[in-house]
Image (cartoon, grey):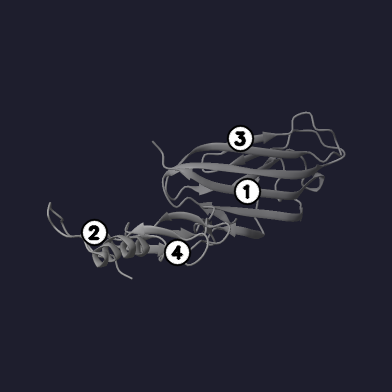
């Protein structure tokens, strides 16, 4: 049933039973009681003149937001705007006493078209200016007869994020890192490992690199 505009009543006018039922009883039913048909539904105004819409309950883990035209509420499925790359295997670097890039073998998740499939080493391309969280870890094994400090750095500016200073020969150090900073659109994020040993004395076993968008930069 539709809402009916209530007429103006002045002193001396009669208010009949029919008017009472039409403008009070029926209008009340037309707003809330008759609109609801299931648990969890919400009523919202569709215009500024007593028109209403009905939004049914969403599903977990949906969140309530505004539609693209900014005219009504709607439910959307939340999405993590970011990417996760992983490497698992056994790789002996092709360099001695130098940096080498990690070539990630698996793209676990890409929630914003970050993956740069054209790059040699599966880099992450930043889609827009903003504040991002970059995190990950590396797991290496050290040679028995070599000395030195394995390290990890990330692009685009070779920021040092891990150093296994004091690692013993034959050990298996694990390094984790997490930084929050501003990136510009099209910046390329990569992960490189420093091999302080001879080729046969150093092995990359696991690596992970993730980037998550946090918000616009100020």
Specify which label sits upstream in the sequence, 3 or 4. 4
Q: CA distance from mark 3 to mark 4?
A: 58 Å
Q: Residue furthest bottom?
A: 1
Residue 36 disc label: 4
Q: CA distance from mark 2 to mark 3?
A: 61 Å
Q: Contact, CB < 8 Å: mark 2 with mark 3?
A: no
Query: In the rendered view, would you say 101 is above or below 105?
Result: above
Residue 110 drawn at (x, y percent): 56, 58
Residue name at image x 15 percent, y 56 percent: 8
- The residue carrying pointer 2 sits among few (fewer than 14), some (14 to 19) or many (20 or more) residues within 10 Å by Cα, namely few
Of badges 2 and 3, the one in the foreground is: 2
Residue name at image x 54 percent, y 47 percent: 212
Specify which label sits upstream in the sequence, 2 or 4. 4
Residue 209 disc label: 1
Which residue has dot 3 on it? 160
Q: CA distance from mark 2 to mark 4?
A: 20 Å
Which residue has dot 2 on it? 49
Residue 196 disc label: none
Q: CA distance from mark 3 to mark 1?
A: 14 Å
Q: Contact, CB < 8 Å: mark 3 with mark 1?
A: no
Query: In the rendered view, would you say 30 is above or below 66?
Result: below
| 7 or 72: nearer the viewer | 7
The image quadrant that residue 135 belongs to is top right
Residue 199 drawn at (x, y percent): 77, 47
Q: CA distance from mark 1 to mark 2?
A: 53 Å
The quadrant of the image that shows the N terminus is bottom left
Tag 2 secondary structure: loop
Of badges 1 and 2, the one in the foreground is: 2
């Amino acid at each position: 049933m539709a809402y009916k505009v209530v007429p103006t009543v002045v002193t001396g006018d009669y208010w009949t039973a029919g008017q009472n039922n039409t403008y009070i009883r029926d209008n009340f039913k037309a707003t809330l009681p008759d609109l609801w048909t299931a648990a969890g539904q919400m009523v919202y105004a569709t215009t500024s003149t007593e028109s209403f819409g009905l939004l049914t309950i969403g599903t977990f883990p949906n969140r309530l937001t505004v539609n693209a035209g900014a005219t009504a509420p709607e439910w959307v499925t939340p999405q993590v705007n970011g990417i996760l790359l992983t490497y698992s295997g056994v790789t002996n670097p092709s360099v001695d006493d130098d940096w080498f890039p990690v070539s990630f073998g698996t793209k676990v998740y890409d929630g914003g078209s970050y993956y740069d499939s054209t790059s040699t080493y599966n880099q992450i391309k930043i889609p827009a200016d903003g504040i991002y969280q970059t995190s990950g870890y590396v797991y290496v094994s050290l040679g028995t007869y070599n000395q030195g400090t394995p390290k990890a750095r990330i692009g685009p500016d070779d920021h040092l994020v891990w150093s296994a200073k004091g690692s013993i020969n034959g050990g298996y150090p694990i390094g984790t890192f997490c930084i929050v900073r501003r990136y510009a659109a099209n910046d390329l994020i990569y992960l490189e490992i420093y091999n302080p040993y001879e080729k046969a004395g150093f092995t990359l076993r696991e690596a992970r690199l993730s980037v998550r968008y946090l918000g616009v930069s100020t």
